[in-house]
């Protein structure tokens, strides 16, 4: 909960630190929008893989290799 509160405070702090967007390391809007753009591009890539490429990862109904019983058994 504290990390969520800290993230909210940082978003508020970055957005109120300046009144315009500028590509600069000390611009609050740039510091706020850069990670958001990276997260959004990850969601877009996952959506493309799921609905356009129809990757078996999303609809196979099977677990990953880490879930395989032979890998979990001690040697």
Image (cartoon, rainbow, N blue to C red):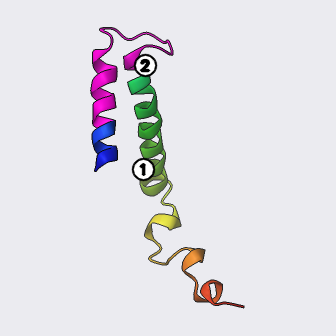
User: Does the stretch in magenta take in 10?
Assistant: yes
Farthest front residue? 2
Secondary element type, mark 1: helix
Q: Position of residue 35 (x, y in %)?
A: 45, 32
User: Which mark is in front, 1 or 2?
Assistant: 2
Q: Nearer the viewer, residue 61 or 7?
A: 7
Q: Nearer the viewer, residue 10 or 69?
A: 10
Secondary element type, mark 2: helix
Q: Is residue 18 above or below residue 34?
A: above
Please rate how many residues cluster around mark 1, counting C-alpha atoms within 10 Å: few if below 14, some from 14 to 19, many from 20. few
Farthest right residue? 75
**The C terminus: image quadrant:** bottom right
CA separation, marks 1 and 2?
25 Å
Exactly how many numbered labels are in the figure? Answer: 2
Please rate how many residues cluster around mark 2, counting C-alpha atoms within 10 Å: few if below 14, some from 14 to 19, many from 20. some
Q: Is residue 12 above or below residue 72?
A: above
Residue appearing at x 42%, y 45% in the figure = 43
Image position of 70 (left or right of 4): right
Q: Is residue 9 above or below residue 55?
A: above
Q: Position of residue 20 (x, y in %)?
A: 33, 8
Q: Which stretch did the figure color magenta? A: 7-30
Image position of 71 (left or right of 13): right
Which disc is residue 30 wearing? Answer: 2
Q: Which of the two discs, 1 and 2, labels the residue nearer the N terminus? A: 2
Image position of 56 (left or right of 15): right
Asked if the residues shown at circle 1 and circle 2 are in contact, with their CB atoms under 8 angstroms apart, the answer is: no
Which disc is residue 11 wearing? Answer: none
User: Does the stretch in magenta take in 28?
Assistant: yes
Q: Position of residue 24 (x, y in %)?
A: 50, 12
Q: Position of residue 67 (x, y in %)?
A: 54, 79
Q: To which residue does mark 1 refer?
A: 47
């Amino acid at each position: 909960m504290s990390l969520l509160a800290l993230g909210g405070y940082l978003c508020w702090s970055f957005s109120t630190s300046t009144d315009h967007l500028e590509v600069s390391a000390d611009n609050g809007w740039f510091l706020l929008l850069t990670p958001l753009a990276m997260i959004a591009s990850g969601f877009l890539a996952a959506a493309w893989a799921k609905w356009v490429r129809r990757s078996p990862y999303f609809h196979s109904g099977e677990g990953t290799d880490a879930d395989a019983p032979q890998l979990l058994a001690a040697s």
